[in-house]
Image: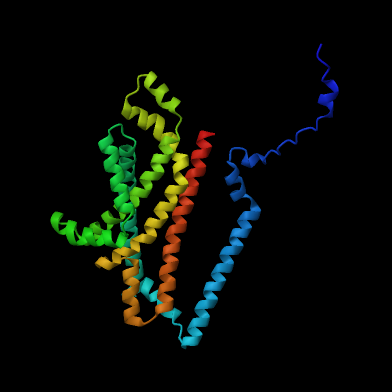
């Protein structure tokens, strides 16, 4: 007979149980719980305030050493102007609208091109996979400014593209390769059993992609895609080098006329920050809504 194990079991120390997260974090991943905790949020706000204070102090110190005379009272005139009995958009608002137009169109094109490139990377045909990989490596390995000049001086004259659409297309192609890698990773994260079950039910490939695979990739894709789209808004300033009158170009023109370098560049930076923060807030709201629908 084997000896009794009763005392031996009793002498073992009890394993510590992992504390359960609060109820509001029940459906969140560990990294999201850390990011959503009040302490981390307060620390992030404190860091942002400290960084902003340092930047303002450096600007004030530099302007004082240079003997710069601030002219903030002239900045509102460059945003909105009173003409006759009404108000008219100033150069900064006109540039802001052009930047929004370029960015929004480039976002749509980048997502569509990224999805097509990701599908080609996952295709069963070696030729398509090789072509998509070569496209990604070439675009990702060359500077955006060089690509913009190639589009402007070579492609645009051949097909008759204007400056606006040349800049939009160059931005979309550049950002699409990063979006393609994000989408490819999200698609590969779907369990193989999902594909097998969908094919066993007799669904076509188009239906499988639309109704089974892509809905499961939304949550993994949203955070990195938000970062790519925010970068696209910031990178849109490069279209000013081909004489597109976006926010950056309008700011440069105002400075050449008024010599208000500090005031205008601070205002331009604030307008870009407003656009990127609005996009981040929108994506965070979409992510929370998708999580609630899937709960």
**Quarter of the rendering containing residue 19:** top right
Residue 172, image x, y percentages: 30, 52
**Residue in view at x 27 percent, y 56 percent:** 170
Q: Residue furthest right?
A: 7
Above or below residue 115? Residue 237 is below
Q: Nearer the viewer, residue 57 or 188?
A: 188
Front-lying residue, 86 or 183: 183
The residue lying at 42 percent from left, 48 percent from top is 225
Question: Does residue 237 lie above or below 6 as drawn?
Answer: below
Report the front residue among 187 and 25.
Answer: 187
Residue at x-position 58% and y-position 41% = 29
Q: Disc count in the image?
A: 0
In the rendered view, would you say 210 is above or below 143? above
Residue 291 versus residue 243 in the image, above or below: above
Q: Quadrant of residue 146?
A: bottom left
x and y percentages locating residue 167 in the rendered image: 27, 59
Q: Is residue 33 left or right of residue 267?
A: right
**Residue 191 place in picture, x, y as percent:** 46, 30
- Identify the residue at the far front of this view: 1
Q: Is residue 92 left or right of residue 274?
A: left
Which quadrant of the figure contains the C terminus? top right
Location of the N terminus by quadrant is top right
Which colour style is shown?
rainbow
Residue 238 visible in the snapshot: yes
On the picture, is 86 further left or further right than 64?
Answer: left
Q: Residue at x 59, y 50 (%)?
A: 35
**Residue 160 placement, left or right of 15:** left
Residue 90 seen in the current view:
no
Q: From this viewpoint, which residue is outermost toward the bottom?
A: 67
The x, y position of residue 209, in whole percent, is 36, 31
């Amino acid at each position: 007979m084997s000896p009794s194990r009763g005392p031996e079991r009793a002498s073992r120390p009890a394993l510590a149980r992992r504390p359960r997260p609060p109820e509001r974090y029940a459906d969140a991943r560990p990294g999201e719980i850390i990011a959503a905790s009040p302490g981390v949020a307060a620390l992030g706000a404190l860091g942002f305030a400290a960084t902003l204070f340092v930047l303002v102090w450096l600007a004030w110190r530099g302007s004082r050493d240079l003997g710069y005379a601030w002219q903030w009272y002239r900045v509102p005139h460059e945003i909105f102007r009173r003409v006759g009995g009404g108000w008219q958009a100033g150069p900064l608002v006109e540039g802001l609208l052009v930047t929004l137009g370029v960015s929004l169109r480039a976002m749509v094109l980048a997502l569509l091109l990224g999805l097509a490139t990701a599908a080609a990377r996952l295709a069963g045909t070696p030729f398509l996979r090789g072509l998509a990989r070569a496209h990604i490596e070439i675009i990702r390995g060359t500077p955006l400014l060089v690509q913009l000049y190639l589009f402007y001086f070579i492609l645009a004259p051949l097909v008759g593209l204007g400056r606006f659409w040349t800049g939009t297309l160059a931005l979309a192609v550049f950002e699409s390769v990063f979006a393609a890698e994000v989408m490819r990773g999200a698609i590969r994260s779907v369990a193989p059993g999902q594909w097998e079950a969908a094919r066993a039910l007799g669904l076509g490939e188009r239906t499988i992609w639309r109704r089974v695979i892509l809905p499961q990739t939304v949550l993994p894709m949203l955070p990195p895609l938000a970062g790519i789209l925010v970068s696209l808004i910031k990178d849109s300033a490069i279209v000013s080098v081909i004489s597109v009158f976006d926010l950056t170009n309008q700011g440069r023109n105002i400075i050449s006329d008024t010599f208000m370098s500090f005031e205008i560049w601070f205002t331009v930076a604030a307008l870009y920050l407003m656009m990127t923060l609005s996009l981040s807030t929108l994506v965070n709201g979409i992510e929370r809504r998708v999580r609630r629908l899937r709960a």
